[in-house]
Image (cartoon, helix red, strand yellow):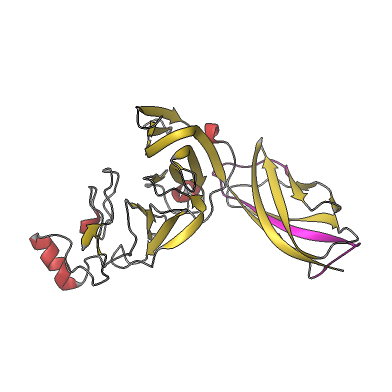
Amino acid sequence: MVEFLGYGRGRGLAHENTFWASAGHAHLIMDTRGQGWPAAGGSAADTDARAAGTVPGPVGPGGDENKTVELSDRRFVLNNRSKPYRTIAYSTDGGVNYTPFAQDTQLTDPANNASVMRYAPDAAPSDPQSSWLLFSNTEDASARRNLTVKMSCDNGRTWPIRKVVDPGAAAYSTLTRLPDGRLGLLYERAGYQHITYAPFDLKWLGGTCADITITPPATLKAGTGAEVTVRVVNRMDVRRDRSTMDLTVPGGWTTSRVVVPALNPGQGADVQVPVTVSAGASGSVTLTATYRASGKQASGNATVTATP
């Protein structure tokens, strides 16, 4: 049984070294029996490619309505419809070979068509915008509802910015960048009764892209004080002024806000956040660090262990 991994909507960009990855519809082909598929077409160019070993190999099983993006580091990523989470596969050789599909637990999905795109595909790799991705889908593990737009500033490694567009019934969606830099979102809603167009800009999305890394001390002993190191890296293309870092701790623990210095694009800083562990603390707990800058915020989590 041979099937298409999925049909795109004409949003693909031709990869400069891979003729078959041009804009169009059927992205890849797979054999659901796992026996491979020797060809990706019937043209003379396809024949030459097969002889050279550059026709894409099988990906899957489990492919359905995948979306393909070329990332700023020249990897290809397939973002695939699946429940309860989207599944992802990567290629480092221009789409000839892919890793097995793996769940991205940041992208909850009811097995519905979605959309993913690079915000600035022509940006130089040194430009922070080159690694910005936008993603839209119905963010629900079982039902087609809760249409949400997310943004990543690190090629999809994390998705710290999120906003709900329509909490009700919704279905397929597609994103595009408009000439003025805004985004256009077209989606089905209200039980397939309507198709709605909703333009928006990044300011509307809110949030800020920042890497947040929490490094606890070697020991967190009950009833004592300690300092937790939090590193923040600005992944936006604008300077963030002097800002703050807060730590959310379990009940009975105490902490206080600290100041984060101004950060230029790509710049990072380490801050020390004081905590006092409650007297009866024991076992694993979750700490959440929240960075607030220019009216926007980003956060990160870490699990730490308290000892009696």
Q: Is residue 242 magenta?
A: yes
- Residue 211 in view in this figure: yes
Rendering quarter of residue 34: bottom left
Rendering quarter of residue 222: bottom right
- In the rendered image, residue 204, in percent from the top left (x then y), is placed at 53, 31
Q: Residue at x 38, y 32 (%)?
A: 191
Taking depth in this image into account, of 301 and 252 the one nearest to the observer is: 252
Outermost left residue? 44
- In the rendered image, residue 47, in percent from the top left (x then y), is placed at 11, 66
Q: Residue at x 72, y 42 (%)?
A: 243
- In the rendered image, residue 208, in percent from the top left (x then y), is placed at 59, 42
The magenta stretch is 219-243
Q: Is residue 71 left or right of residue 28?
A: right
Q: Is residue 162 magenta?
A: no
Taking depth in this image into account, of 246 and 17 the one nearest to the observer is: 246
Q: Residue at x 61, y 42 (%)?
A: 239
Q: Quadrant where the C terminus lies?
A: bottom right
**Image height of 200 relative to 120, above or below:** above
Q: Is residue 152 left or right of residue 68?
A: right
